[in-house]
Image (spheres, rainbow, N blue to C red):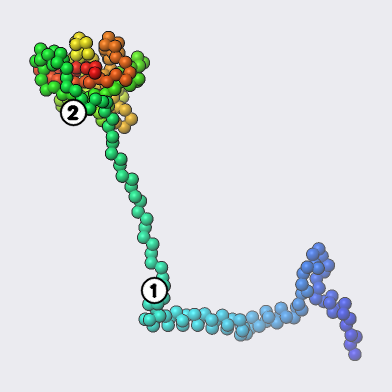
């Protein structure tokens, strides 16, 4: 008769060796259970879990086929699908209208009589008001020595096509524009010569009166915030300018 096994001996067969943290581990089942499972797997014995998943997959496939074949159910399934979202169109901001600030008085006064007599004495024709503006501090600084004529404030095109071609020519450095000398009638009715040229201001181009402007401003007592008018006329198809202080 076999000797009965004590409780301690029975438990020792299913416990790991005493190591750190062994008290947290579960007891190991008999090795015979593992060996039997591996044998069944090698023989290809049927597995209840295998059949369960197999039948479940077949049932899902059969359900999908039934949805396709039956029109009513397929329509209901398709109707539940969310419609595609329309693409968001980028709204371009509307360009703001460019507001041109013009110096008062408005409407601009006519050319004074003494200037008309001076222009008639030169047989001047095609009289036009180029610009009416308020002199800025930059216009009066000796460091800059120029009178800016913004293209947005120019009231009319006073130059011929030949004049535009001359003003488009550049200097040797390829950056600055060449200018052309223009006869000028000063506010004091004195005659002088000044240089008219194009000037790149940011992305736009404008005109400036450069060489000789500082002397004209000093001789005629021009200061910042003074309102001036610049008129153009032609003598023998050559453009002339007249500067009026209001």
Q: Is residue 185 left or right of residue 28?
A: left
The image quarter in which residue 134 lies: top left
Closest to the observer, 46 or 102: 102
Mark 2 surroundings: few (<14), some (14-19) or many (≥20) residues within 10 A: few
Say which element carries label 2. Answer: loop
**Residue occupying image coordinates x 89% and y 87%:** 2
Q: Measuring from the top left, give residue 196's x and y in whole percent.
A: 23, 19
Q: Measuring from the top left, give residue 26's x and y in whole percent.
A: 77, 72
Q: Which mark is residue 156?
A: 2
**Residue occupying image coordinates x 35% and y 20%:** 137
Q: Quadrant of the N terminus?
A: bottom right
Q: Which mark is residue 69?
A: none
Q: Is residue 202 left or right of residue 111?
A: right
Closest to the observer, 174 or 244: 244
Mark 1 surroundings: few (<14), some (14-19) or many (≥20) residues within 10 A: few
Of the image marks 2 and 1, the number of the one nearer the N terminus: 1
Report which residue position mark 1 lands on: 79
Q: Is residue 213 visible?
A: yes
Q: Quadrant of the C terminus?
A: top left
Closest to the observer, 129 or 36: 129
The image quarter in which residue 154 lies: top left
């Amino acid at each position: 008769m076999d000797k009965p096994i004590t409780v301690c001996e029975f438990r020792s067969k299913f416990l790991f060796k005493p190591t750190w943290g062994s008290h947290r581990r579960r007891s190991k089942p008999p090795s015979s259970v593992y060996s039997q499972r591996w044998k069944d797997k090698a023989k290809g014995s049927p597995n209840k879990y295998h059949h369960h998943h197999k039948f479940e997959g077949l049932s899902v496939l059969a359900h999908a086929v039934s949805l396709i074949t039956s029109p009513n159910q397929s329509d209901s399934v398709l109707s539940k699908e969310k419609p595609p979202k329309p693409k968001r169109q980028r709204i371009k901001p509307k360009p703001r209208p460019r507001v041109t600030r013009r110096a008062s008085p408005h409407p601009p006064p006519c050319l004074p009589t003494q200037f008309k007599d001076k222009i008639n004495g030169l047989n001047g024709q095609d009289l036009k008001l180029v610009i009416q503006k308020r002199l800025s501090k930059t216009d009066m600084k000796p460091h800059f020595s120029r009178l800016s004529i913004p293209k947005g404030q120019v009231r009319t095109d006073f130059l011929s096509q030949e004049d535009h071609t001359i003003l488009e020519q550049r200097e040797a450095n390829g950056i600055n524009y060449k200018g052309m000398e223009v006869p000028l009638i000063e506010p004091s009715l004195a005659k002088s010569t000044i240089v008219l040229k194009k000037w790149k201001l940011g992305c736009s181009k404008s005109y400036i009166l450069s060489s000789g402007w500082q002397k004209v401003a000093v001789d005629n007592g021009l200061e910042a915030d003074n309102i001036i008018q610049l008129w153009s006329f032609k003598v023998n198809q050559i453009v002339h300018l007249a500067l009026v202080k209001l």
